[in-house]
């Protein structure tokens, strides 16, 4: 099976049907999306297709990018481009094989193919019988199609997997951010091409598609048993970042008809096991994957940028700025694909009625355990690069006051619930999640006003707009408190405790030090804030 020739990925078509088609079908007008049975596979399919397009069809400059966005190549032309690298995308045969170790690993003991699934319980979990929410037994038989996609998903997200089982190039559970059109009927081509970067912005030497510098499985595996065997950014071609391969794995493919436990389809090949060996590619040092945002400590410029990861509580506007803004002063840069979009906005928007949106997704990992998969859609704004630092400072101020308000809200809810709230244990992240979701609209309304005001070189919200946002923040806190702490009457003593907690919350929301500073900075008069 060759991944650039064979019909192996299912697509969603404009008539509502789903069909397996060759990869070259991504340019068809009636192909709207991938149709994978798992959310992480859907995200991986996007990264696979974007990686292929960037590798073989990267436009030279912005005008060429726009031409190809508006007029995709014909299927036969696209297939000719894919043919340049088809030799690297064999999933079966004598090898080398896509994302599989150069060596056949004959001495390695086979393990169940379900181990390729990131949320699958590990050997220790099975031994201790701790697979309570994610049960053993999922995906024990896969079609070759789904096994290959599971393998790719693992290689690009690889968490730590025990001694010598290396993490991915972006660390375990990286956040991926893509730019997508707003229109629900946008073609898959538009969704993918928005994330392909022109060579004028991302300048790199012509790649060699045969020496392993782009596709590591084409050359002998760079093992990492010994010191000084790390792989750094300067050791490989920049396109290698799409195809990094930290794990040494060989699929065991059986030529027999089976029902895939992932897709439910009957397949002509079955994968029940794979062989794996530790000490694969040990990616180290600073990288800048084009689909992931990074952060660093601006007070330590010699420090390495760290890829943004999924975190408990999901993907909210709490970290939206890191996914959409780049700033040396603040120690952050958004994914290069997002920066590329900002460079295109003036030219791109001439033919578009609505700005694209940001799709952010990824695993929240606790070391090698998957706690959750998060996927979220967030807004993008037309944002001149030269104004980003000024606007970002104001956004940081809003986020800081928001986080402070959440802390006071959560603390007083716990004070209403417990006799000793500081000693109370338990997961209260649902309060945080509700807070971020309910205050999201008012936050992005304030951001839109900030960006609009910046056109006139006014980088701070005027009093009326600032007061509107502050009132919305207060109302969110008080609504949450009333809902969680005053929803039942309780006894007299309990009610007294809860009323005192509400008074403390109200006192901070209307008279706290940070609130007063915000009001002073934005010239909000005390008598108007209650309007």
Image: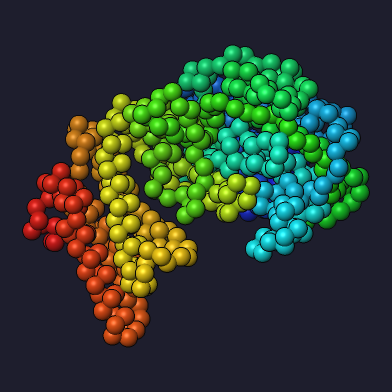
User: Residue at the spot x=73%, y=46% of the render?
Assistant: 116
The one nearer the camera, 426 or 468, is 426
The one nearer the camera, 279 or 358, is 279
- In the displayed structure, 92 sits above or below 38; it is above
Residue furthest right in the image: 256
User: In the figure, residue 319 lies in which quadrant?
Assistant: top left
The one nearer the camera, 452 or 164, is 164
Residue furthest bottom in the image: 491
Q: x and y percent of residue 294 in the render? A: 47, 33
The answer to whether residue 108 is left or right of residue 11 is right
The answer to whether residue 95 is left or right of residue 81 is right
User: In the figure, residue 24 lies in which quadrant?
Assistant: top right
User: Residue at the spot x=59%, y=27% of the render?
Assistant: 284
User: Residue at the spot x=26%, y=32% of the render?
Assistant: 390
Q: x and y percent of residue 240 in the render? A: 64, 25
Picture quarter with the N terminus: top right
Please say whether residue 45 is visible from this viewpoint: no
Q: x and y percent of residue 385 in the render? A: 34, 27
Please say whether residue 125 is visible from this viewpoint: yes
How many numbered markers are drawn? 0
User: Residue at the spot x=56%, y=26% of the render?
Assistant: 285
- In the displayed structure, 109 sits above or below 483; it is above
Which of the colour schemes (rainbow, by chain, secondary structure, one colour) is used? rainbow
The one nearer the camera, 180 or 348, is 180
Picture quarter with the C terminus: bottom left
Q: x and y percent of residue 186 in the render? A: 53, 43
The answer to whether residue 432 is left or right of residue 257 is left
């Amino acid at each position: 099976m060759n991944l650039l020739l064979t019909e192996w990925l299912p697509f969603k078509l404009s008539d509502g049907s789903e069909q397996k088609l060759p990869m070259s079908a991504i340019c068809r007008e009636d192909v709207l999306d991938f149709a994978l049975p798992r959310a992480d596979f859907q995200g991986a399919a996007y990264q696979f297709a974007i990686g292929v397009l960037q590798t073989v069809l990267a436009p030279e400059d912005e005008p060429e990018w726009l031409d190809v966005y508006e007029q995709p190549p014909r299927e036969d032309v696209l297939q000719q481009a894919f043919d340049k690298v088809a030799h690297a995308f064999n999933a079966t045969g004598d090898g080398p094989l896509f994302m599989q170790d150069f060596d056949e690993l004959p001495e390695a003991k086979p393990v169940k193919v379900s181990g390729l699934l990131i949320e699958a319980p590990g050997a220790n979990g099975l031994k201790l019988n701790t697979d309570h929410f994610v049960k053993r037994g999922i995906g024990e038989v896969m079609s070759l199609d789904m096994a290959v996609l599971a393998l790719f998903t693992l290689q690009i997200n690889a968490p730590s997997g025990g001694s010598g089982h290396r993490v991915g190039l972006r660390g375990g559970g990286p956040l991926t951010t893509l730019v997508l059109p707003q229109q629900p009927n946008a073609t898959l081509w538009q969704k993918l091409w928005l994330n392909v970067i022109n060579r004028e912005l991302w300048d790199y030497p012509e790649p060699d598609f045969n020496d392993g510098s782009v596709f590591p499985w084409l050359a002998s595996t760079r093992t990492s048993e010994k010191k000084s065997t790390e792989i750094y950014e300067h050791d490989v071609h920049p396109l290698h970042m799409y195809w990094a391969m930290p794990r040494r794995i060989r699929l065991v493919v059986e030529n027999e008809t089976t029902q895939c436990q992932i897709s439910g389809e009957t397949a002509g090949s079955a994968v029940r096991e794979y062989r794996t060996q530790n000490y694969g590619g040990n990616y180290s040092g600073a990288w800048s994957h084009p689909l992931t945002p990074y952060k660093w400590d601006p007070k330590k410029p010699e420090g390495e940028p760290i890829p943004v990861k999924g975190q408990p509580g999901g993907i909210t506007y709490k970290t939206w700025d890191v996914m959409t803004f780049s700033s040396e002063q603040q120690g952050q840069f958004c994914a290069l694909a997002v920066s590329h979009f900002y460079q295109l906005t003036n030219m791109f928007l001439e033919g578009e009625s609505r700005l694209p949106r940001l799709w952010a997704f990824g695993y929240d990992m606790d070391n090698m355990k998957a706690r959750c998969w998060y996927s979220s859609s967030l807004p993008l704004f037309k944002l001149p690069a030269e104004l980003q630092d000024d606007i970002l400072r104001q956004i940081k101020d809003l986020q800081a006051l928001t986080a402070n308000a959440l802390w006071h809200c959560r603390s007083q809810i716990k004070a209403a619930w417990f006799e000793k709230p500081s000693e109370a244990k338990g997961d209260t992240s649902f309060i945080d999640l509700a807070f971020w979701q309910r205050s999201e609209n008012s936050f992005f309304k304030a951001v839109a006003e900030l960006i609009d005001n910046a056109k006139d070189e006014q980088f701070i919200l005027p009093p009326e707009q600032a007061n509107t946002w502050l009132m919305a923040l207060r109302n969110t806190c008080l609504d949450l408190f009333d809902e969680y702490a005053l929803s039942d009457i309780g006894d007299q003593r309990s009610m007294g405790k809860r009323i005192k907690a509400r008074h403390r919350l109200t006192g901070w929301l209307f008279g706290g030090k940070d609130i007063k500073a915000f009001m002073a900075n934005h010239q909000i008069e005390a008598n108007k804030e209650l309007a």
